[in-house]
Amino acid sequence: MRADAVRGHLDGLLLAALEGGPLHGYAIIAAVQERSGGALELRTGTIYPALTKLERLGLLRSTWDSVGERRRRSYELTDAGRRRLASERSAWEEFTAAIGSVLNPAAPPHPAS
């Protein structure tokens, strides 16, 4: 899948990946890749600025964890993030229904009599 295919949908993808609970950056990338059946491969240079933006908007909160001697930041949804995810899903369903009705019409239109 083309890299630009996620453009405009990255925030929703990240929020959805975090719906099940806190994850660190690489786990978010893995969750999106797994849930997409390998079709979506996000890069760290793409997600970290987006995660920072989502946190700044109050949609995520982060904490630092230590794993051995390494520190990593984990992200989780806020209540506002859950509301935004619901909104993103609704907008996505409307968008895909509209595009689907054009690309795959259920029945060809009948000429007016």
Image (spheres, grey):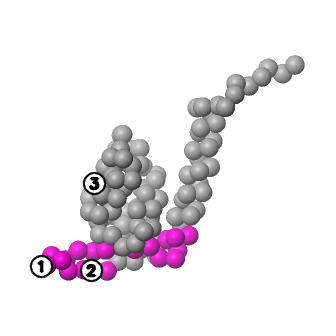
Which residue appears farthest toward the right when viewing the image? Answer: 113
Q: Earlier in the sequence, mark 1 or mark 3?
A: 3
Find the magenta span and give its range.
63-83
Residue 101: % across, % down: 64, 36
Residue at numbered disc 1: 69
When the figure is inspected, residue 83 is found, relative to residue 6, above or below; the finding is: below
Residue at numbered disc 2: 64
When the figure is inspected, residue 80 is found, relative to residue 3, above or below; the finding is: below
When the figure is inspected, residue 19 is found, relative to residue 70, above or below; the finding is: above
Q: Secondary structure at mark 2?
A: strand
Residue type at mark 3: give it. Answer: Arg
In the image, which disc is placed on residue 31? none
Q: Secondary structure at mark 3?
A: loop
Residue located 57% across and 44% down the image: 96
Seen from the viewer's position, the closer of residues 54 and 36 is 36
Q: Within the image, what quadrant is residue 17 found in?
A: bottom left
Residue type at mark 1: give it. Answer: Glu
